[in-house]
Image (cartoon, grey):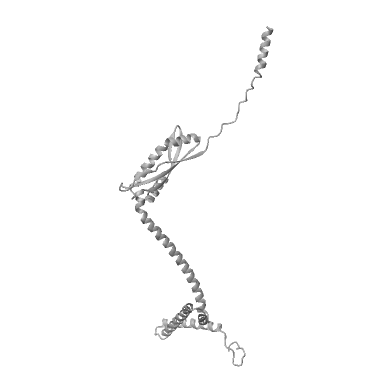
Amino acid sequence: MWFLALWRRLLVLLQGPEPVAAPISSAPPPPPPGRLTERREISTPIVVPARGYVFTFRIRAMFVWSSNGIPREMLSGSAQYFMPYAVRALTNLAAARARNFAAHRARDLEVELQRELAATGPWRYERGGAEVACKPYVWVELDEGVKQAVRPYWEQLIKLDCEYDVDVKRAQNADRLSRQWLSILGKLVDNPAAGGAAKMTDENFAAVVQELIAQQQAATQRLNDLIEDGLRSDDEYERKTSFDLLAERLKSHGRAASAEPREPSRNGASPRPGD
């Protein structure tokens, strides 16, 4: 008997202490994920016939899948499962719209598809109680045969556009230089010493200044002739208008005369005001 008791005690020592049970955690489970998105692109473009069924359009597309409240693994699995359905729906939509556009109107078809997709909103699919949304984005490319046919046309447009830019730059530079010259010439023409300044400049510039002075003098003479004709007219309105113009002309000459320096008197004294 003592031998059995010793044997049991030896087994207890060899087994070690019993493991202590871990306390049960009372922490709540992690909250479900919020809104998740995943992008998927098709490897090969969608090909649909253009108007006339001779050439085609090539449509590249990207699908943005989104979900709310489901794990990412479930979103990825749903996107993988519903991807063929989304591609088929986009193909049917593009084929129905493309037959209304000529083969070189890829941009117009792209705008039409984008407008249609924006109006309908995201496509929704449900699987196993989980709902996912899909929003397609499209880009339309020309058929290779159409690209070769329209290349000369676009090369010519690019050339004309570049030439137009060059002409605009030239016109802007010419306008800026013209304004500078007009400012300089205007100051010279208004200056009583314009004739002398013209003689001191080169021949071309002098010719321009002298021509402007001559034009100004001719315009003044024409105005004087018109005023004189109006004064001799029997029409009372014309006479009154001519008198007004004559009065304004006298005022202008009076201001110009007052600005000019007076000649010294014969005895060398400066002139008095009112002389």
Does residue 111 appear left or right of residue 26 in this picture?
left
Which residue appears at 43% of the width and 38% of the height?
Answer: 124
Does residue 101 appear left or right of residue 126 in this picture?
left
State which quarter of the image contains the C terminus.
Answer: bottom right
Closer-to-camera residue (187/260): 187
Which residue appears at 44% of the width and 36% of the height?
Answer: 80
Please give the count of numbered marks on the rendered protein: 0
Which residue appears at 40% of the width and 58% of the height?
Answer: 158
Which residue is at the far bottom?
Answer: 267
Residue 97, percent from left and from top: 35, 46
State which quarter of the image contains the N terminus.
Answer: top right
Residue 130, percent from left and from top: 46, 34
Q: Is residue 121 visible?
A: no
Residue 268, percent from left and from top: 61, 91
Does residue 12 appear left or right of residue 135 in this picture?
right
Does residue 182 appear left or right of residue 18 in this picture?
left
In which quarter of the view is residue 44 placed? top left
